Amino acid sequence: MTPQYHIMVVDDAVGDVQLVKLAVAEAPYPCAVTTAGNGREALDKLRGDDTPSRPDLIFLDLNMPQMNGKETLKELKSDPDLATIPVVVLSTSAVDRDVTASYALGASGYITKPMDMDEFFQAVRRVEEYWFNTVRRPLKLLSAT
C-alpha cells in the first residue's frame, strides 16, 4: 500500500523513535516516516532534498543535542514554508513551563511520553486519528505568506 501520509519524528532517543514507527505501522493510516536525531537535522531535511515529501505531521521531542525542541519549534513556526505543518511535542517532560512554552511557540499539541508501551501506542494512534481523520485540512497546504 502506498503511503498516504508522511510523518517526521524528531527525537534523539532511538528507542522512542522505534516505538513511534511501530505505532504508526500498526495504525490504519498508511504513513511514510522520516526521522531526525535533532532539530538542526530536521530543518536541514525539511529545507533540502532528503525528505521524500512535506510531512503532514511532526512529532518533536524537547530534549535533544545541538538544537532542542523549543529552538526547533520556534524556527519551524517562523518559516513561512514550514509554519503550517502541525507539530505535536512528544516529550518525557511533564513540567508546566515546557507545556506552556511549547504552545506559545506554536505547538499543535503536547503529549508527555507514556511509560507503558500500550499507552504510548494509543497516544500516537490518537494523534494520527485526529490529524488524518477528524480535522479538516486544506488539500494543498500553502505557506503563511
Image (tube, helix red, strand yellow):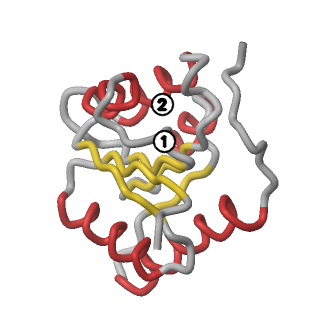
Tell which tag, 1 or 2, sits nearer the viewer: 2
Which quadrant of the figure has residue 91?
bottom left
Tell me if 104 is positioned left or right of 68 in this view.
right
The answer to which of marks 1 and 2 sits earlier in the sequence is 2
Which quadrant of the figure has residue 38?
top left
What is the x, y in percent for residue 1? 46, 74
Q: Please count the marks in the image.
A: 2
Residue carrying label 2: 73
What is the x, y in percent for residue 6? 48, 53
Q: Residues within 10 Å of mark 2 (few under 14, many from 20)?
A: many
Describe the element under mark 2 as helix, strand or loop. helix
- Image: 111 above or below 47: below
What is the x, y in percent for residue 82? 55, 27
Residue at 75 percent across and 44 percent down: it is 139
What is the x, y in percent for residue 107? 59, 40
- Image: 69 above or below 57: above
Image quarter where the C terminus lies is top right
Kind of residue sitting beneath label 2 = Leu
